[in-house]
Amino acid sequence: MTLLLARGVAIAEVSGQVAALSDYRYRGESLTGGRPAVQVAANYDHSSGLFLGGLASTVRIDPTASGLGAQLYGGYAQQVGERASWDIGADSNFFPHSSIEPSYDYSEAFVGVSYLATSVRLYYSNDYFGAGGRGVYLEVNASHPLIDRVSLIGHLGFLDHSQSRTPTTDRKDLSQLDFKAGIAIDLAEFVLELSIVGTSAERDTCAAGTAHCNTTGVVSISRSF
């Protein structure tokens, strides 16, 4: 889902976040049918480098797969010098089971590196979104301070999946780019995020089959604890 971030090694700590979003976009695709979402996340980082956590979110992939979805993840991270780190791990994604489609559930492995406020991650699944085919996803995430309490945020991702949940005869349609560009505003206890999110996927080739792959504006507000 959206919570996995590059991290360095820290002392053992527990953290979390609650958020409200105008649209839950995952790799450019709406997992709420263009509707708002509420999310709760929790993370545990151990001083050894081990980490684990989870995210729960309201989702609506199709009319019969609506309710609560979740992502559970874990892995190992290590600092390299003062500015860089690497990590490796796996995540499992769970969705309400649809009465008209195979399960959307899937798991994937990942490896990543980060330098200052830029991170790169590569993911691999052999059953992407339960479609029965592999999925390879590469993403770059970055942020940069603009003025006091305001930062630019950016994301670029490339997905190649071998099997679509909807029929397609054009193999090229199964490779797609997605992006996110916006600003994050620190409002003391809250963070307000305004962004534009989109993907090159056509409506009938969205990876999860939601047909919600259009470019749109997204507003979110979150609080960490």
Image (spheres, grey):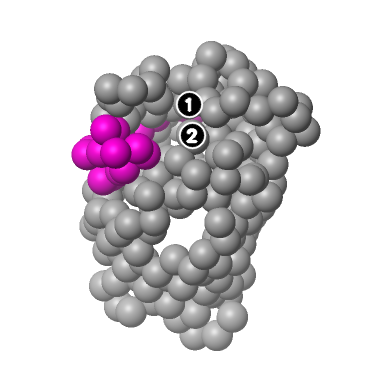
Look at the numbered disc 2 and give the secondary structure of its residue: loop
Q: State whether the magenta stretch is mostly helix, strand or loop.
A: strand
Q: Which residue carries the number 1 mark?
A: 129
Q: Which mark is residue 59?
A: none
Q: Could you tell me if residue 223 is visible in this image? A: yes
Task: Count neighbours of disc 1 (C-alpha within 10 A) and say few if under 14, some if 14 to 19, many if 20 or more.
Answer: many
- Answer whether residue 37 is magenta in the image: no
What residue is shown at x 45% (from left), y 41% (from top)?
A: 210
* Region of the chain picked out in magenta, as a range: 53-76
Can you give x and y, in whole percent of width and height, for residue 66 in the image? Answer: 25, 38
Quadrant housing the N terminus? top left
Whether 24 is drawn above or below 107: the answer is below
Q: Quadrant of residue 54?
A: top left
Q: Which residue carries the number 2 mark?
A: 208
Residue type at mark 2: give it. Answer: Ala
Q: Nearer the viewer, residue 194 or 42?
A: 194
Label 1 vs 2, first from the N-terminus = 1
Quadrant housing the C terminus? bottom left
Can you give x and y, in whole percent of width and height, for residue 90 in the image? Answer: 48, 24
**Tags 1 and 2 touching, CB below 8 Å:** yes
